[in-house]
Amino acid sequence: MRLAFSPDGRRLASAGGEAEVRVWDVTTGRNLWSWAHPDTEMVLDLAFSRDGRLATAGDGGVCLWDVATGKPGKRFKADGGSSCVAFSADGKRLGASFGPTEVRIWNTATGAVERRLPMLDDQVMSLAFSPDDRWVVAGGFNGSVVRWDLLARPQ
């Protein structure tokens, strides 16, 4: 089961073991919406941006959701699936594992891939941006941690 609070603490997103994503009203416990992920059979991770957008990662890729309606929006296909997802602090970038050993950084406005970052001999299991959006860090299945400087020019 994956859980994430919205930045204002009023909503809780959940997914686990299947492709269904649910958003709950924290105060009332009411299910606001439930929707099947359009490209995956299992949701493996989810994250809210500071402005309240929701992203999910699964075996078919990544999806951004309209939290107000529960409708899927922009999708990023990932061969080999995506096990983790994270927004940059400013919400302008979305990072996700891409297949087992790569991290991709997308521009959330355009959908363009900004960076392709190799994990090097480990499966990506977790991802985080630094609060100033300079760094993105990935944690691997075998315990490795890789950090990339997003201000450095891509090679």
Image: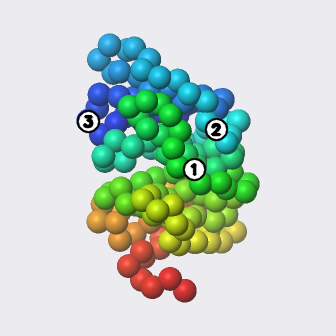
- Give whichever of discs 2 and 1 has the lower sequence position: 2
Neighbourhood count class around disc 1 (C-alpha, 10 Å): few under 14, some 14–19, many 20 upward: some
Q: Secondary structure at mark 1?
A: strand
Residue, disc 3: 8
Residue, disc 2: 38
Is residue 26 shown above or below 39? above
Q: Secondary structure at mark 2?
A: loop
Image point (41%, 34%), residue name: 67
How far apart marks 3 and 2 lie (CA) works out to 27 Å
Colour mapping: rainbow
Q: Position of residue 26 (x, y in %)?
A: 33, 21
Location of residue 80 (image quadrant): bottom right
Whether residue 23 can be seen here: yes
Neighbourhood count class around disc 3 (C-alpha, 10 Å): few under 14, some 14–19, many 20 upward: few
Image point (67%, 64%), residue name: 101
In this rendering, position of residue 136 left or right of residue 115: left
Q: Are marks 2 and 1 in contact (CB under 8 Å)?
A: yes
Report the amino acid beneath label 3: Asp
